[in-house]
Amino acid sequence: MGLSAKVTGPGRIEVVETDVIEPGAGEVTVAVDRCGICGSDLHWFGGSGSIPTVCPGHEFSGRIDKVGAEAGPWTRGRRVTVEPLRRCLTCNYCKAGNYNLCSSLGIHGVTHDGAMATHIAVPAYTLFGLPDLLDDELAPLTEPLAVCVHALRLANVAKGSRVLVLGAGSIGLLSVLTAKRMGA
């Protein structure tokens, strides 16, 4: 048995027992170590966003527990984090690297079960191995940090750039740190 968060309404979450999760073809099961709370999670919790019908949580890290068939070279016990976007991999958008436009796009914690649980099954293509020097408490911040790095690269931030960041949540604060690191 496992445990999973179930949203029952704005401001209401229950912890429920779940069946053992087995990875499908091309998937691994991750034993969740830490799961962050995103601003989008705070919106639905506060009643101003769409309430997920699946287990929430998309900023997380853990260790691979089980490796499904065709999941590649991943091994049990490896520390990982996950890009929470699921896609088809076969449409023209996915093949061109523009999977954000895939008509089958899904997001863990929104359209697919998320990581506010003891275990989560994810496609192996979403995994990123974590270095030993990265602290367990910081590891779930890799997803929001990746958002910041991507946005600042799109904005061509470089040495001498001036950057305005509105908001001091985790994305805002990580954007400031990333922009400074890029020379802004």
Image (cartoon, helix red, strand yellow):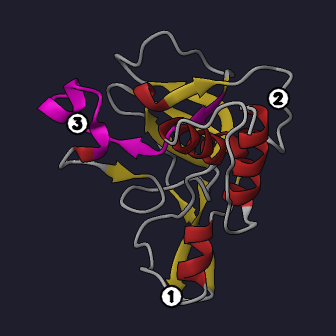
Spatial separation of the CA atoms under disc 2 and disc 3: 31 Å
Return the x and y of residue 160 as percentages of the image width and height: 72, 36
Q: Of 168 and 64, which appears nearest the observer?
A: 168
Q: For the point 82% across and 38% down, which residue is it?
A: 136
Work out whether mark 2 precedes mark 3 in sequence or the reverse, and give the earlier one.
Answer: 3
Gap in Å between the C-alphas at discs 1 and 3? 30 Å
Could you say which is closer to the camera, residue 21 or residue 126? 126
Q: What stretch is highlighted in magenta?
A: 80-100
Q: Name the residue under label 3.
A: 88
Q: Tell me where residue 97 appears, x and y as whole percent.
A: 29, 28
- The reply to whether residue 162 is in sight is yes
Q: Is mark 2 on a helix, strand or loop?
A: loop
Residue 152 inside the magenta-drawn segment: no
Q: Residue furthest top?
A: 73
Residue sitting at x 45%, y 38%: 122
Q: Residue 134 — which label?
A: 2
